[in-house]
Amino acid sequence: MPQHLGDAMQTIDRIILTAQAAGEVIAFDEGISFWGGVDPDTGRVIDAHHPAHGEGLAGRIVLMPTSRGSCSGSGVLLQLALSGHAPAALVFREAEEVLTLGALIAARMFDRPLAVLRLSAASYAALAGESHAEIAGDRLRAGTLDLPLMPVTPGDLALDAGDLARSEGAAGRAVQLAQEVLGTMAAVQGATRLIDVTRGHIDGCILAHDANLIFAEAMAEMGAQVAIPTTINAISVDRQGWRDRGVPPVFGNKASRLADAYVRMGVAPTFTCAPYQGVSVPAQGEVIGWSESNAVIYANSVLGARTAKHPDYLDLFIAMTGRAPETGVYLDANRVAEVVIEVDAPDGADDALWPLLGWLAGRLAPDRVPVLQGVAGLSPSPDDLRAVCAAFGTTSASALLHVAGVTPEGDAPPRPGAPVLQITRGDIAAAWAEFNQGPEAVELIAIGSPHAALSELRAFDAALAGRSCAPGVAAILTVGRDVLEGARADGLLARLEGAGVQVIPDLCWCSITEPVFPPGARTLMTNSGKYAHYAPGLSARAVRFGGIAACAEAAVTGRAQAAPPVWLA
C-alpha cells in the first residue's frame, strides 16, 4: 500500500487532533465522501450508493477505513463543526487527509475541535465491535478497551530557510497560519519535508454551505495572497449573469462574495473544474499543488504531472507558500500500480463505457493505484479519459490510475504480487443498471460534470441533428468560459441555443441549485459517472445515465432508453 505514513503510524494508535469526545460507535466497512455523501446541515448520510445511507453522524464516534471522493469533504466537515452537527470523533485505520484537514481548520481557526484518531488494524477492529466509546486526553476507552494514544507532531519535519521564516511570522499571520497547518498535515501524512510546487488550483469556492465563505473571507481579511499562479474551480453561480437567471439575491451575493474573496487573494478568475482543458495545463513531470478530485486524477494520470489530492483549504495554504508535503503520489514509489484490473471491454461501446469503467475501477481499488488493462485497442480520447478519472474519484481515495498502453506511466510494471482483478461485461451492465434506477421519462439533461469540453458540445450538437428539445425538457451544458467563447466563435453556441439548449459558464452540476436547476424536474439524465453517483444525494432527483448521443435523444424525446445500449446486451 502507499506509504502515506511511516511504518510506525501503521502499528501505533495515534491521536491526530485532541478533543474530549464520547458517543455511540458507528463503523463503516467502506469510506464515504462527505461532499455529496453527507448533508452539511444535518450530518446525515445522503449517498444513495453507500450502505449507511440515512444514518446520522452527529455526535457519534465514526469509524471508516479512510474517506474517499471529493476534496470538498473538508469543507463539509467544517460546516458540520460550525453548526454543531459534526461527529464527536473520526477514527481511521488508514491514511486520511480530507476530513482531517477540515477538523484541523475547525480547531485552529474557529475553536470547534473534534477528535481525530488513526488506529492500528487490531485496535480499529476491537473498537468497531463496541457500542460506545470515550476519548479523554491521550486515552481511548470503550468497554474493556483502554488504549494509550500517541500524539502526532511535526517535530521531525525538515524545514528550509523560507519555511522557517514563514513559520516565525516573517510574511504575516495569514502565511504563518498556512505554514503551521502545512506542517501539521505533513506530519499526519508521514512526510519528512515540504517541496516546491509551480501552480495551484482552489476547490473550496462552491457555496454549498456557509463554511466555505466564512473561511475564505477570514483568510482574505487576514491579508492572504497566493505566491504561485493559481486557478479556481467552478463556483455556484454564473458570475456575470446570475441575476438574469432568477437566482435569489441572498444566494447570488454570497456566492459572488466567495468568488471575490479568492480573487482578492490573487487567484485567477478561471471558474472551471477542468483547468487542464487549456486554462492551466501542467507538463509531464511538473510538480503542482491542485485540489478538486477529477482535476487531480486527470493531471496525475493523463498528463503525468504530480500532485496529491489536496483537501479544500489546504489548497489555499499551498498556493500561499508554494510548498506542499512530499507524500503520496509525489513520490515515485507511490505511483506504482498496486492493483491490476483486466477489462473485458464490450465491442462497439460508445462513450458511456468510460465513466462506468472509472466508477468500477474505484470500487475495486478504493485506496490503491490501479492499472486498467485491455482497453488500449479502443483508443480512448481525452474526453474518455476525463470521464474515467472523474468517475474513479467518486469511489476511490487514490489520486492516480494508469491505463496500459495509453497513459504516460501505464506500461510501468505493477508492484510485485499485485492482485489481478477483473471488470467483466456483466459488471459493466450492472453498473449501468445502478446508474439507471430512475423512470424513463426525463425532464432534465445534465452535461458538464466536470465541465464539458468543446468537443462534447460539438458531439451533442451533432446528435441533435437539427432537432430541438422537447417541451418540458431542459438541456443544460455547464462549461468553462474559454469553452463558451470557443463555442460562440464558431456558431456552435447559437445552434445549441436555437435548439433550446442552455450553455452556462462558471458553475457545474456539483454546485448548481434552483432555480437554475429546474425546480419541476423529477428525473435527470447525465453522461457523467461522477454526477450519476452524486446527483441523488445532491439534487434529491432520480437519475438516468447514458452517452452523449443517448442524452441528446432523451432531450428530443423526453424519454431515456429503457434497455441497456446494444453493446451491453
Image (cartoon, rainbow, N blue to C red):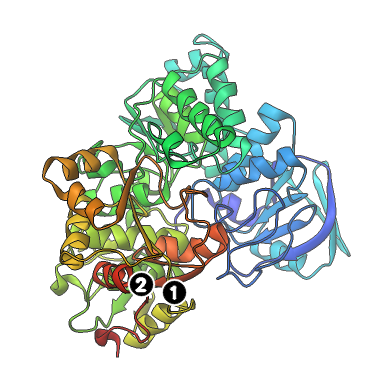
> Closer to the camera, 311 or 280?
280
User: Which label belongs to residue 60?
Assistant: none
Q: Amino acid at mark 1?
A: Phe
Q: Which residue is rendered at x = 28% and y = 54% of the image?
A: 301
Asked whether the beta carbons under mark 1 and mark 2 sit within 8 Å of each other, the answer is yes
Picture quadrant where residue 199 is located: top left
Task: Give the crowd class for mark 1: few <14, some 14-19, many >=20 residues within 10 Å.
Answer: many
Residue 206 position (above or below residue 366): above
Picture quadrant where residue 46 is located: bottom right
> Closer to the camera, 466 or 316?
466
Q: Which residue is rendered at x = 62% and y = 73% of the image?
A: 51
Q: Is residue 472 left or right of residue 90?
A: left
Q: Amino acid at mark 2?
A: Leu
Residue 15 locus on image (x, y percent): 71, 45
Residue 141 locus on image (x, y percent): 85, 56
Name which of mark 1 and mark 2 comes first in the sequence.
2
Q: Residue furthest right?
A: 143
Q: Which residue is rendered at x = 36% and y = 44% of the image?
A: 273
Residue 29 position (above or below residue 296): below
> Closer to the camera, 82 or 286?
82
Residue 489 position (above or below residue 402): above
Residue 368 seen anywhere in this rendered image of the structure: no
Q: CA distance from mark 1 to mark 2?
A: 9 Å
Q: Is residue 257 left or right of residue 87?
A: left
Picture quadrant where residue 237 is located: top left
Query: Which residue, given by chain and number where applicable, does mark 2 sit on?
Result: 356
Query: Which residue, given by chain and number where applicable, does mark 1 sit on?
Result: 435
Residue 266 locus on image (x, y percent): 39, 20
> Closer to the camera, 294 or 129?
294
The local secondary structure at tag 2 comes to helix
